Amino acid sequence: MNWPADFIWGVSTSSYQIEGAVALGGRKPSIWDTRCRTAGKVANGDTGDIACDHYHRYPEDIRLMKELGVEAYRFSVAWPRVLPLGKGAANEAGLAFYDRLIDGLLEAGIEPWLCLYHWDLPQALEDLGGWTNRDIAGWFADYTTLVAHRYGDRVKRFATINEPSVFTLFGYAMDWGAPGIIDRSAHLRAIHHVNLAHGAAVDALRAGVTNAFVGAIHNRQRIVPQSDSEADKAATRTLDAFWNNAFPEPQLLGSYPAAIAEAVAPYVEAGDMARICRPCDFFGLNHYGPIFAKADPASLWGFAWGSAPDDAPKSDIGWPIYPDMFRDELIDLSRRYRLPIYVTENGCGGRADKGNELDDQHRIKYLGAYTAAMHQAMAAGADVRGYFVWSLLDNFEWGSGYGNRFGLVFVDFTTGKRTPKASARWYADLIAGR
């Protein structure tokens, strides 16, 4: 496959999943520190306390990226590390960590792509209502201004919020993630306030960073009814609205999708949609595979995750593999939103207990199929300009703890030792051979 000369190849991580050092350098707890200490919420009682110890071992991780040949690194800043209480006094030790990381990346010839929020809300703000409190849009704008002024001389690529549909749905409607609330009003308020925070952050980045290149990151995939029943089809439409459209539609087109607009309306004030719909420079897409949906009258919104067909190809962790749907999603996104697309996450989960994680041919097969599908989408006219593998390192995978491994690099979580997998060599060859 021939790739454009300016196509960007990268890797992605997030702060809570790799940094560790949760009580060092002035950092205060996040909502995920709290959830990890709530019995039964994370597999094996795992926590992000140490994770990959990236806080101390970031120079080694930069060397690994340089060996891969990646041109860009997408990471997130931990809000509770730079503003321990979420607002008020900044934490110099936390800010200095990202100075060192950014400077190390630039020295290695790797462009930093900074994501402002990847799910680790300061617990102090959660105690004030978190995303259910409308004031959070202002808190997030102030945090963004701090980050912009500190790093904007060296960082130009910014994402506001990672996968808002996921953390609002899992955190406020399903108890699959922090803060673990199941409440319709809380879920709808969180959706609207996250959108307001996005718009406020875009404006803060424009004001604080010369030549800022700004977007948001959305997890989008086809929602497929588990059966042909009308109930499953209705559940699919509802899930599609919450999962795929509740954020890009208002952020880029200025309105909520029809399926949820009436429900969100009580929380929308005059001028809100203009505050949300701010000009963006790119669309960040996270994509793994389709979701199969089924009706569940006992759930908050009447839907639940169903099962893929028995004969569907699946990863080691059971996620369905449909590269053609990835191709079609890229084409559809490019037509609908008319923005350059950067695939900010795509990858394949495995399990260390299967004994194939160093010679991870399953991941190579997946990445090969999905990059080929991306190439097909580009040939069909999709404006795709970059691709970031999830993830550089095996890491803390939220509710799954350390059981699911997505890294190009194997991490021994006892010693912290990093070992590149076969997929790392494959990815390095793909980049070098373009």
Image (tube, grey):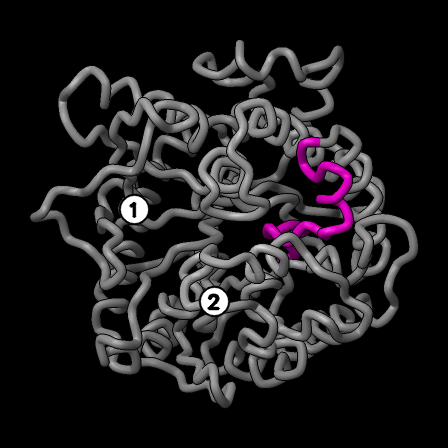
Q: Which residues are magenta?
A: 113-132
Q: Residue at x 22, y 28 (%)?
A: 225
In the rendered structure, the answer to whether residue 166 lies left or right of residue 353 reads right
Mark 1, secondary structure of its residue = loop
Determine which quarter of the picture holds residue 305.
Answer: top left
Q: Label 2 is placed on what type of residue?
A: Gly
Q: Position of residue 58 (x, y in %)?
A: 63, 79
List the single residue furthest toward the front: 39
Count residues near mark 2 (Cα–Cα under 10 Å), then give few for <14, some for 14-19, many for 20+: some
In the rendered structure, the answer to whether residue 206 lies left or right of residue 12 reads right
Q: Nearer the viewer, residue 105 or 83?
A: 83
Give the vertical position of 428 relative to 218 (above or below). below
Earlier-in-chain disc, 2 versus 1: 2
Q: Position of residue 397 (x, y in %)?
A: 45, 62
Q: Position of residue 239 (x, y in %)?
A: 37, 28
Q: Label 1 is placed on what type of residue?
A: Gly
Count residues near mark 1 (Cα–Cα under 10 Å), then give few for <14, some for 14-19, many for 20+: many
Q: Residue at x 67, y 30 (%)?
A: 193
Q: To which residue does mark 1 refer?
A: 289
List the single residue furthest toward the left: 311
Q: To which residue does mark 2 refer?
A: 45
Res 26 seen here: yes
In the rendered structure, the answer to whether residue 37 lies left or right of residue 244 reads right
Judged by depth in the image, the label closer to the viewer, 2 or 1, is: 2
